[in-house]
Amino acid sequence: MSRFMTIWLPRWPVQRRLREHPEWRTVPVFVCRRERRGVMTVASWAWADAPREAASGVRSGHALRIPAGTSLAEAMALLALTYGSRACHVAQVVTDDPAADRAALERVARWCRRFSPAVAIATVDDAARSARGPDADPHAAPDCLFLDVTGTAGFFGGESMLVRTTAWTLAARGLHARAAIADTPGAAWAAAHHTHLLANDVATASPRPPRRRPRRWAVVPAGEQAVLLAGLPLAALRLDPATTTALREVGIDSVGGVLKLSAKSLASRFPATLGLRRAQLTGTRAEPLACSTGSESLPQMSHAFELPIPTATLTDDMLAAVLEHLLAGCVSPLAARGEGVLALQVRLEPPAGMGMATSAPTVVDIGLFRPSLSTRHLLELVQLRLGRLRLPRELDGVVVEVVAAGAAACRQRALFADATDGTGTRDTSADRTAAVDMLLDRLSGRLGRDAVFEPRSVADAQPEHAWIAAAPADANARPTVTPHRDRAGRGGPPAGAPLRLAGRRPIWMPARPVRIEPLQADLVAVAAIDPAAERRPPLRFRLAGQVHRVAQSHGPERIETAWWRGPIVRRDYYVVETETGGRFWLFRRLKDGAWFLHGVFA
């Protein structure tokens, strides 16, 4: 019996932009479309890290509903009514781009081919749009994938492990997805969109109460979709509004009520769409999937061995020769049109069938910071990843697929060298940039892509949250900053100069502020002369067992966080210079007057 898996990416236009701009997770994001007469309407919106408590006292940020098609002015009014006017000032408003959403979904579909070779993007017709409920967008782009997992679930330890692995691996890539497996694409679509209405363990149909946070996956056992999905609303059938209204007029508001109707009643009293959707849900009528993910324009090479080869007898040189041949076949068509490899997937296929225990294919994902056309560089990255993986006992074939490509930089050779390395070898700036890019690729291949990043500042009042870990930017696009240095090579203002560092941030900050201990004798003596002196930096403080004497200070710089960030943080920051020449960034917590060290200047 055929089995299908549906992957649903809720609010896909917003998710795509949050992946490109991680700093937008702390603010509301509106994806809008310009209608006639310049009216902006909301296509999709979300607030990833919404405040726990709204201004109106409503718990959780998901209580606010802004249906698709609402004007931007009305959406802002609802946002201000729920979270206050400040939320409208920090909101990000971007223009809808269905073509870019579709292209990004195609890249996700190509990546999901590790779970099944047959991946299709769900077509969005009028019925499917209306089935998304009151928040549906009449011009929405697709946000679902259909996978035929009939023969691939065994590689992952069963359907339950496959659907769970799918949801969490997508979550690791920054995508919120819900997945479900059933006999038909329609049943899997219904289960994926209504996991919150299903039992905690659909596979056993346990009558447990719904969880506060529903799981992101579900498995409908073979032949049980008519029973387990009977309690779902009519939206699970992907019906158009006219058919839904006609059913509700006769008192039918669930899938089970539709399944109880006879074929004669369906044909005589309701549109033909209802009979089609019911037949697709139950499996009496097939729903063909168009497995076209746009991968035809990206090369793919495969090599099948005549007989399964044990990995114990497969040397590194033999595997490298096969990979080099496949990589060269993928790079050649890209180079002909001026493109390079941005993302690559290598799959080592084990033998399947013949009554033997099967194992999952070994999948290697390679991501590059810049498009590359170097076969040797790509082979080195693949070998770095393969050296850390456990290969299957036998190999039946190797598949290399280009997941993403980009315009390759074409550099002209320099007539004169910018510098030499002492041996007369030319070292141009373009060569140095290419060498840095290759170094970043090697580091990400050895340490993981998340371990290679550069700190990028964002607009946030709280210093420990004023930066994000972003992918390294182009070295040529980075602004050149020449810091002041004294004769000893130290950064910062020269010793003895007036401290005018308000608004600056230190070059080193601990993960958490470190509490310091002002000497009690100084506090008592100063308080007897000036009661307001307790708000100023201490004359002496103890840090890691060492006493520091403050020579001069500058401040305060008041920092307060917004109310929607949770508990309000109120601090007074000072830049102090000790008698030994050290410059520290101290702050006083206004809540209780405690002092902390939050950074050290050079």
Image (cartoon, helix red, strand yellow):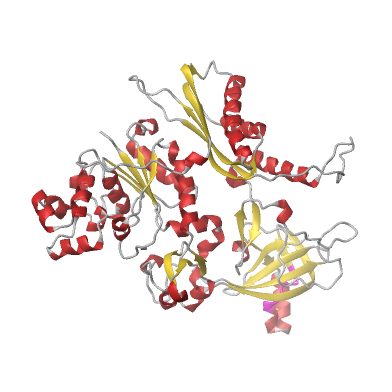
Which residue: 50% across, 48% down? Answer: 173
Quadrant of the drawing holding the N terminus: top left
User: Residue at point 71% right, 69% down?
Assistant: 519
* Magenta-colored span: 534-540
Task: Give residue 4's position: percent from left, percent from top.
Answer: 31, 40
Q: Is residue 56 above or below residue 597?
A: below
The location of residue 236, given as percent across then percent down, is 26, 54
Q: Is residue 575 above or below residue 349?
A: below
Which residue lies at the image location 25% right of the left edge and 50% below the top edge?
A: 199
Which residue is depicted at the point 62% across and 51% down? 471
**Residue 600 sits inside the magenta stretch:** no
414 in relation to 478, above or below: above
Determine which quarter of the picture holds residue 74: bottom left
- The one of 363 and 237 positioned closer to us in this rendering: 237
For the residue pair 204 and 244, the one nearer the viewer reads as: 244
Residue 175: give x, y in percent of width and height: 46, 51
Tally the marks.
Answer: 0
Where is residue 83? Give x, y as percent. Answer: 44, 74
Q: Is residue 582 left or right of residue 571?
A: right
Is 320 displayed left or right of 180 in the figure?
right
Q: Is residue 364 above or below residue 99?
A: above
Give the side of residue 579 with respect to residue 171, left or right. right
Residue 158 makes an appearance in the image: yes
Please check the rendered image and state whether residue 539 is part of the magenta-colored stretch, yes or no.
yes
In this picture, residue 266 sits left or right of residue 166: left
Is residue 365 among the parts visible in the rendering?
A: no
Location of the C terminus by quadrant is bottom right
